[in-house]
Image: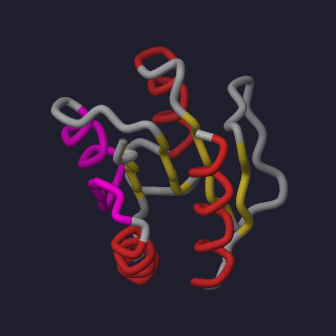
Amino acid sequence: MTKKVFVADDSSTIRKLFQMVLKKFNCEYKIASDGEDALKKLESFRPDIFFLDANMPGKTGWEILEEIKKTFPDSYTILMTADDDEQSDINPDLLIKKPFSIQDLTMILSRILEIR
């Protein structure tokens, strides 16, 4: 079964990186450029895996994570951040430090798809 992956990041470079990697894995995916765009796209897309940028304009990845945990409780959530001091009452399944390479992303996605 094809996995559905959702990515929300305000960096066009990161979005392009995800598009390249996700095509290799033959995943169905949607990509959002900010928090508000993410919430709109989630109205019609039910992902298995979420990659969220912690610091986006509008709604942050942390805020979206809180909503996702309520709406998609069985999904796998990954928060991407460059900050060391980020904390929340709601924790993602995985926290990824930015910057990361295409090789890092490929390895992470490969592992997640194996366990999901």
**34 to 92, vertically: above or below:** below
* Residue sticking out furthest to the right: 85
**The quadrant where residue 38 appears:** top left
**110 to 85, vertically: above or below:** below
Q: Where's residue 4, x and y in %?
A: 36, 45
Which colour style is shown? secondary structure
**91 to 60, vertically: above or below:** above
Quadrant showing the C terminus: top right
Indicate whether residue 41 is drawn in magenta. Answer: yes
Image point (46%, 27%), residue name = 68
Image point (19%, 38%), residue name = 40
In the image shown, does 69 or 85 lie closer to the viewer? Answer: 69
Magenta residues (range): 26-42
Q: Where's residue 54, x and y in %?
A: 58, 52
Left or right: 46, with 115 as reference point: left
Indicate whether residue 69 is drawn in magenta. Answer: no
Q: Where's residue 96, x and y in %?
A: 71, 60
Image point (34%, 72%), residue name = 23
Left or right: 100, with 27 as reference point: right
